[in-house]
Amino acid sequence: MQHLDCEVLVIGGGVTGIAAATAAARSGVKTILIEAKPFVGGNATTGLCLHNYITKLGRQVVFGMAQEIVDRLIKMGGAVGHIPYGDFVHSVTPVDGELFRVLSTQLLAEAGVTVLYGTNVIGVEAEGGKIQSVQLGVKGGVRTVRAKTYIDASGDADVAVMAGANYRKGDKETGKMQPVSMVLRCFGTNNQAIADAIAVRQPAMATRADHPVPFPVYFNGAFSQWNDIIRENNIFPNEDHKVFFNTVWPNHINVNTSAVVGVDGTDPLALSRATVELTDQIYRISQFLKDHVPGFEDAYFVPSVFAGVRETRNIEGLYEINDEDVNSGRKFEDTIGQICFPVDIHDPDTGQAYFYQIGDDGAFDIPLRSMIPKGLSNVLVAGRCISATSYAHGATRNMAPCLVMGEGAGVAAALAVKDNVDIPELNVPKLQECLEERGVFLGDRERRVKQVNR
Ligand SMILES: Cc1cc2nc3c(=O)[nH]c(=O)nc-3n(C[C@H](O)[C@H](O)[C@H](O)COP(=O)(O)OP(=O)(O)OC[C@H]3O[C@@H](n4cnc5c(N)ncnc54)[C@H](O)[C@@H]3O)c2cc1C
């Protein structure tokens, strides 16, 4: 294998990593992306909504690469735009998982990122708060890669923690983490019939160029009317089990309703056991849907290929986004972007989902400092493992925020390389200028200054 050293090394090719690596490479620095799976896109490839672009008050605050992805997916037939929905969220942005994977692969290739698939970071050499190199487990053995700046987009903060960063796992008091789940993909469905039977309100309705008649693309509800059958056949552990449906097709739908609780997603054995349990659970759910729920009579079921992990480590950063920041919709001087999906917590004991609205105008800023691990000078952490309380993580873990953080981290890492400075010494106004040039929305400047001086 040829020489691998680079300027920016991104670890993890989920939504965060693809945005980070693409943004860094587009900024003109040599970028390598390391991904353990044989494909990029992470959890978005299971076919979910990119939550969320538009605040509770109806204002779009997420733009930049996150919006570019939606625009390109619409052209590919893999998205239907931001569709109004009147429940816990103002609007939804469903995407096709496979087309998200295709587009992610294209974006990285167009930007000139070298992607190493099927490669795990298994060790880090760090000295004086600086990562010197990382070790990769690749076919044929172990390889060492050196970079100037590193972006940890592993979801679990693997690299930052190996380099010595402090972290918290799950709830501060109990250590409990949100459950792991597996999305069930169902083909050959009658989505209108499913919505008629289950939706708690008018579903989000959309059209496609090849399907001009409006069809349901998102709705949520509960399986309460089948409680007896569910109890008898041990389908779910609780009554009134909640369920979320989304799609960009009239005859294919993704179901998010499985859960295994008490799993530490950083423990390979625990995650492997949960994968077995979820695969079995998903099979039982699919049989229940086919036998009892209208619209699934002729469906063909495909479980997503991996167990989805919602919560593991959050690093201790230069700033921790806290509960009050979320509840007050706080704006920060060192913002790299705004996010607006409500706090979304799947109960660690029951798996049931609960939502809590962001305060003020329904958006808060991601401060650069929350992505900088305390004590490390050439590493940024982006995605679900940034420095945030367990409650705040309920909002930051979602995919539009991950895209915002990924783009912010990529541009910041490239700037650090070009200006030859450590990450904590970055010229923040210059970074913000670069981000705004790329179409990232950093909030109303005057309002921001007023708020941070409060
Ligand atoms: C079941 C489920 C449903 C969800 N539903 C929604 C939803 O509807 N809408 C929404 O917006 N969000 C949803 N989320 C949350 C969201 O999908 C994730 O939080 C988000 O995708 C995380 O992105 P990420 O890039 O930070 O991490 P990940 O997607 O976890 O990506 C991390 C990547 O890094 C790789 N990696 C990890 N460690 C290493 C290593 N040591 N070496 C090399 N590679 C490594 C992994 O293989 C992975 O591809 C859901 C989450 C789950 C689990």
Image (cartoon, helix red, strand yellow):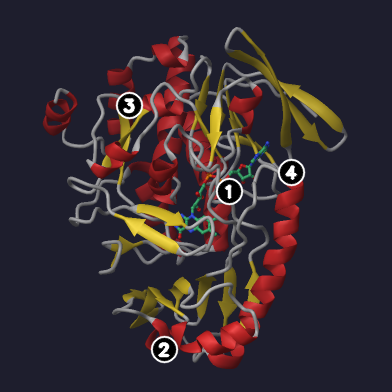
Q: Residue at x 54, y 59 (%)?
A: 349
The quarter of the image holding the C terminus is top left
Ligand 1 neighbours mark 4 (CB distance < 8 Å) = no
First of labels 1, 4 by sequence position: 1
Q: At x 47% / y 65%, what residue is drawn?
A: 352
- Mark 1 to mark 3: distance in Å? 24 Å
**Residue 434 - label:** 3
Q: Position of residue 308 (x, y in %)?
A: 60, 55
Q: Circle 4: is it few (<14), some (14-19), or many (20+) Cα within 10 Å?
A: some
Residue 327 falls left or right of residue 374: left
Q: Residue at x 73, y 38 (%)?
A: 119
Q: Earlier in the sequence, mark 2 or mark 3?
A: 2
Q: Nearer the viewer, mark 2 or mark 3?
A: 2
Answer above or below: position of 4 versus 382: above
Q: Secondary structure at mark 1?
A: helix
> Quick one: label 1 or label 2, which is nearer the N terminus?
1
> For the residue with label 2, is its CB less than 8 Å from the closest atom of ligand 1?
no
- Nearer to us of marks 2 and 4 is 2
Q: Residue at x 24, y 51 (%)?
A: 60
Q: Which mark is residue 118?
A: 4
Q: Residue furthest right?
A: 140
Q: Type of residue at label 1?
A: Thr
Q: Which residue is mark 1?
A: 105
Q: Position of residue 84 (x, y in %)?
A: 26, 67
Q: Is residue 395 visible?
A: yes
Residue position marked by numbered label 2 in the rendering: 197
The x and y percentages for residue 233 are 65, 84
**Disc 2: CA contacts within 10 A as few (<14), some (14-19) or many (>=20):** some
Left or right of 258, for residue 294 = left
Between the C-alphas of marks 2 and 3, the distance is 49 Å
Q: Quadrant of residue 1?
A: top right
